[in-house]
Amino acid sequence: MFFNHAKAHIKGGKKYPSINGVVTFKETKTGIMITAKINGLPQSEGQCTGRFFGFHIHEGTSCTGNVNDEFANAKSHLNTTNCPHPFHIGDLPPLIENNGYSYMTVLINKFKLNDIIGKVAIIHDMPDDFTSQPSRKFRNQNCLW
């Protein structure tokens, strides 16, 4: 089946239940236009504001988990091409919090919509360093959704 657009509904987990939003993916002639509209993000305090959050598509098909790991079934970053980080097809630009909100639009050509249909979009509490290979332990300790 061919899709020309997809949508992921974002909702917070136990640690950050107020997070919610929508991420849309639209296929264009030059790539996939991704638009994220998120609210309820933990806010930064003080003079240095605008907290950064990691943002990825994961290989799992569910945001469920178990007692030890609320998001275990989200699995790792989607990486069907076996590329190093940050070149996984699931690696996306970070979200930047602004008074609890984040809005981002980006055009990328890393994947087709059919590659991500049924996968999960994840927001991580810590910013991505674009170098370290993600570890399961780090991801789960800092996963927001």
Image (cartoon, rainbow, N blue to C red):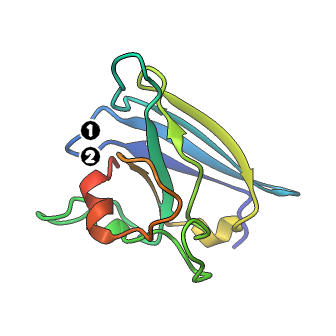
* Residue holding disc 2: 13
- Count of marks overlaid on the render: 2
- Residue toward you, 2 or 119: 119
| Residue shown at the point (73%, 69%) measured from the top left | 2
Instruction: Determine whether, in the image, residue 59 is placed left or right of residue 12.
Output: right
Callouts 1 and 2 close, C-beta under 8 Å:
yes
- Residue toward you, 107 or 128: 128
Where in the figure is residue 36, as x and y percent of width and height? 57, 40
Residue 61 versus residue 54 in the image, above or below? below
Name the amino acid type tagged 1: Tyr
Alpha carbon separation for disc pair 1 and 2: 5 Å
Where in the figure is residue 72, as x and y percent of width and height? 27, 68
Instruction: Determine whether, in the image, residue 10 is placed left or right of residue 84.
Output: left
Q: Secondary structure beneath disc 1?
A: loop
**Residue at the top extreme?**
47
**Residue at the left extreme?**
67
| Residue shown at the point (49%, 51%) measured from the top left | 55
Where in the figure is residue 8, as x and y percent of width and height? 51, 50
Q: Secondary structure beneath disc 2?
A: loop
Which label is found at residue 62?
Answer: none
Name the amino acid type tagged 2: Gly
Residue 80 versus residue 106 in the image, above or below? below
| Position of the N terminus by quadrant | bottom right
* Residue holding disc 1: 16
| Residue shown at the point (45%, 66%) measured from the top left | 132
Where in the figure is residue 78, as x and y percent of width and height? 51, 71
- Residue toward you, 26 or 104: 104
| Residue shown at the point (36%, 26%) measured from the top left | 44
- Residue toward you, 9 or 72: 72
**Quarter assignment of residue 81:** bottom right
> Badge 2: few (under 14), some or many (20 or more) residues near its Cα, within 10 Å?
some
Residue 107 versus residue 62 in the image, above or below? above
